[in-house]
Amino acid sequence: MDLTIRRPTCQCAETGRSIEPGERFYSALVRVGGSIERVDVLADAWRGPPEQTIAWWISTMPEVRAKGPSLASADVLLDVLERLEGDEVEARLRYLLALFLVRRRVLRLAEQGGPLESGPPTLRVICPRRATEYRIRTVEGASDDVAHKLTELLWSGEAA
């Protein structure tokens, strides 16, 4: 699955009009077949997130385009973490994303003690920002493909 989050297209997907610097617009990550596409829509043309949306957010088109890619926001990454829950195909990606968010101090490790649970090993993490505890299935042996997907997910520009 291609999880590239590209820079804004500078064009409204609904009206076809250019998104000018200073204008507010919505962006959505939408699952289309086996990939995820970014859709940008001017605020006045936004009718809510499209079907199959994984995450969405509102932004203001910057006055001067920044050079190079920028890191996706913590809220967007948390939305993706939540949407990937139960997706067995992307379990490794979800696990690596959770570890990244722990390292960035968006999530913190919960105490792992207590009675042994049956089933696959899980990592318990807490998100103080959302007052939520997540249970992430521990998946070892991440491949280069999964690492590449994580890199593409984290950066909003053309991924390395």
Image (cartoon, rainbow, N blue to C red):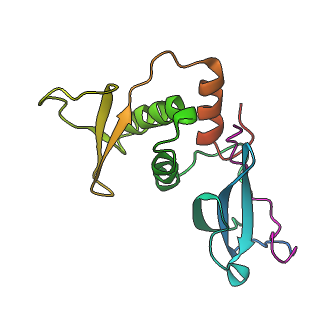
- Note whether 56 is above or below 6 in the view shown: below
Residue 35 in the image: above or below residue 138: below
Q: Quadrant of residue 95?
A: top left
Q: Who's the residue at 73% across and 49% down the image?
A: 6
Quick check: 44 above or below 101?
below
The extreme bottom residue here reads 44
Please report the bounds of the magenta region as a residue range.
1-16
Question: 136 or 150, which is in the foreground?
Answer: 136
Q: Is residue 64 visible?
A: no
Does residue 113 sit above or below 49 in this rendering? above
In x, y percent, where is residue 14? 81, 74
Picture quadrant of residue 1: top right
Q: Nearer the viewer, residue 139 or 147?
A: 139
From this viewpoint, is residue 123 visible? yes
Task: State the image coordinates of residue 21 (x, y, percent, origin top left).
Answer: 75, 71
Majority SS type along the magenta span: loop
Going 67% across and 41% down the picture, which residue do you hit?
3
Tell me residue 76's x, y (percent): 52, 54
Residue at 47 percent across and 42 percent down: it is 86
Q: Position of residue 36 (x, y in %)?
A: 70, 48
